[in-house]
């Protein structure tokens, strides 16, 4: 990988064998029915008090936050205060304006600060004794404007596969505090680990930089092929070409934009997991390419004994925040990093894995005619438009009307972005 990518990831963790992690985690898993002597010595009243404090502390915090954000007046006040504070921090941290030029000051918009509920909320905020609560001038070093990859096009985790979470995870929800439980040899066994990972793509106009594309949660019993099938990728959704009797391109079939992967490979910890195709195995092609390099510059990697569709995450040794490489559909590249490896929890969805947790909104090209709405057609060979191809939206193309002669004119539908159904 390019060393310029080091700023996006890392530092990586120690190697983690997923199967060994499951064995050790299951052996150390406490049982909710077995408790130690200290807990048994407490009176029922004290037990109820401890359990109530544990169960209600988080819910009380969440309910108080929901009350503020569900109230338009209170949430608007909090946002105005935050924006004013951030602007003040930036104003103090920025270099002084050149002589004779005045810096524009941020003026907070007027609101309903005099209402009783706002005054009561502000008094609660002012009463917080945490010294780290306020933003200092040094906070400007950690602030930046939101990027497109910071937004999520999904409003909830999306089921994108058929993986099922096996095992009784309800036992993880016990009112007995974890510190008061004792290990039990009859503890439930969890066959699946939940692995969270983030996928990055190269920026088209800046190949030396990466941007986050999506985030997924896969089960350790699923394969690398299961992950590849759910990656949002334009190369996998391109319309199928239609050829005429002479073999020339005559159009595109947009009825089914789900293409079978024309080869793939995963590069993970000095092993290459190919697709094991008889005619064009990507792993063999990559090794053959490396053999053309001088011996002292060849990467020390080799082909794995199993293919990507046969290799489960249980069989891998992974490192947190270590980038791994995916190549498929010719020369389409992705990088993915492992964010978390953990046991399943009762709050996890029971099925639909791999789950898509985050999807960066697609930035579409605007119509070249109106410049207001995203284009959906690419017009090739139409002399009236002044450029070929020309990106147009549906209303503008209808207003243009059909050309006098269709010879050499082709209407190519643009790739439909990956959406949440």
Image: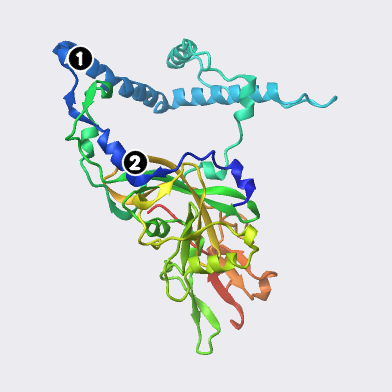
Q: Identify the residue shown where x is 27% and y is 24%.
A: 178
- Residue 259: where, in percent of width, then height? 43, 68
- Distance of mark 2 from mark 1, alpha carbons? 30 Å
- Residue 150: where, in percent of width, then height? 52, 41
Q: Identify the residue shown where x is 20% and y is 30%.
A: 31
- Residue 125: where, in percent of width, then height? 47, 15
Which SS class for mark 2? Answer: helix
Circle 2 Cα neighbour tier, 10 Å, few/some/many (<14 / 14–19 / ≥20): some
Is residue 353 rendered to the left or right of residue 253?
left
Is residue 402 rendered to the left or right of residue 386?
left
Circle 1 Cα neighbour tier, 10 Å, few/some/many (<14 / 14–19 / ≥20): few
Query: Which part of the image, by quadrant, shows the C terminus?
Result: bottom left
Is residue 421 rendered to the left or right of residue 244?
left
Residue position for label 1: 38
Q: Say which label, 2 or 1, has the lower sequence index.
A: 2
Q: Identify the residue shown where x is 37% and y is 24%.
A: 67
Q: Identify the residue shown where x is 61% and y is 19%.
A: 136
Circles 2 and 1: CB distance less than 8 Å? no
Residue 23's tag is: none
Q: Is residue 130 above or below residue 316?
A: above
Q: Is residue 283 visible?
A: yes
Give the farthest residue toward the bottom: 246
In the foreground, 280 or 24 = 24
In the foreground, 240 or 130 = 130
How does the figure colour the protein chain or chains?
Answer: rainbow
Residue position for label 2: 21
């Amino acid at each position: 990988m390019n060393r310029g990518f080091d700023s996006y990831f890392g530092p990586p963790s120690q190697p983690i064998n997923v199967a060994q992690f499951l064995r050790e985690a299951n052996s150390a898993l406490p049982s909710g029915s077995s408790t130690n002597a200290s807990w048994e010595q407490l009176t029922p009243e004290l037990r109820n008090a401890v359990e109530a404090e544990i169960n209600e502390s988080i819910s009380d915090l969440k309910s108080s936050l929901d009350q503020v954000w569900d109230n338009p007046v209170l949430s608007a006040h909090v946002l105005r205060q935050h924006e004013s504070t951030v602007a003040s921090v930036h104003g103090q941290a920025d270099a002084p304006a050149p002589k004779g030029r005045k810096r524009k000051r941020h003026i907070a918009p007027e609101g309903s600060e005099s209402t009783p509920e706002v005054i009561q909320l502000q008094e609660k905020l002012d009463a917080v004794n945490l010294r780290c609560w306020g933003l200092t001038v040094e906070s400007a070093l950690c602030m930046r404007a939101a990027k497109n990859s910071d937004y999520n096009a999904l409003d909830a985790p999306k089921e994108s596969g058929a993986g099922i979470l096996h095992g009784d995870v309800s036992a993880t929800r016990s009112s007995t505090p974890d510190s008061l439980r004792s290990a039990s040899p009859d503890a439930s066994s969890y066959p699946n680990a939940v692995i969270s990972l983030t996928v990055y793509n190269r920026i088209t106009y800046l190949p030396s930089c990466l941007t986050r594309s999506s985030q997924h949660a896969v089960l350790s019993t699923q394969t690398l092929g299961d992950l590849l099938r759910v990656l949002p990728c334009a190369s996998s959704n391109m319309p199928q070409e239609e050829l005429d009797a002479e073999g020339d391109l005559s159009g595109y079939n947009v009825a089914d934009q789900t293409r079978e992967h024309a080869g793939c490979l995963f590069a993970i910890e000095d092993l290459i997991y190919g697709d094991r195709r008889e005619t064009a195995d990507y792993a063999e092609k990559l090794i053959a390419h490396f053999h053309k390099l001088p011996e002292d510059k060849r990467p020390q990697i080799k082909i794995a004994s199993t293919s990507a569709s046969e290799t489960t995450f249980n069989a891998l040794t992974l490192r947190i925040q270590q980038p791994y490489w995916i190549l498929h559909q010719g020369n389409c590249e992705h990088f993915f990093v492992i964010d978390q490896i953990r046991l399943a929890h009762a709050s996890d969805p029971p099925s639909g894995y791999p789950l898509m947790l985050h999807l960066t909104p697609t930035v579409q090209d605007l119509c070249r005619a109106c410049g207001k709405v995203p284009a959906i057609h690419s017009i090739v060979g139409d002399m009236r438009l002044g450029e070929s191809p020309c990106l147009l939206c549906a209303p503008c193309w209808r207003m243009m009307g059909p050309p006098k002669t269709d010879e050499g004119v082709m209407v190519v539908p643009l790739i439909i972005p990956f959406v949440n159904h």
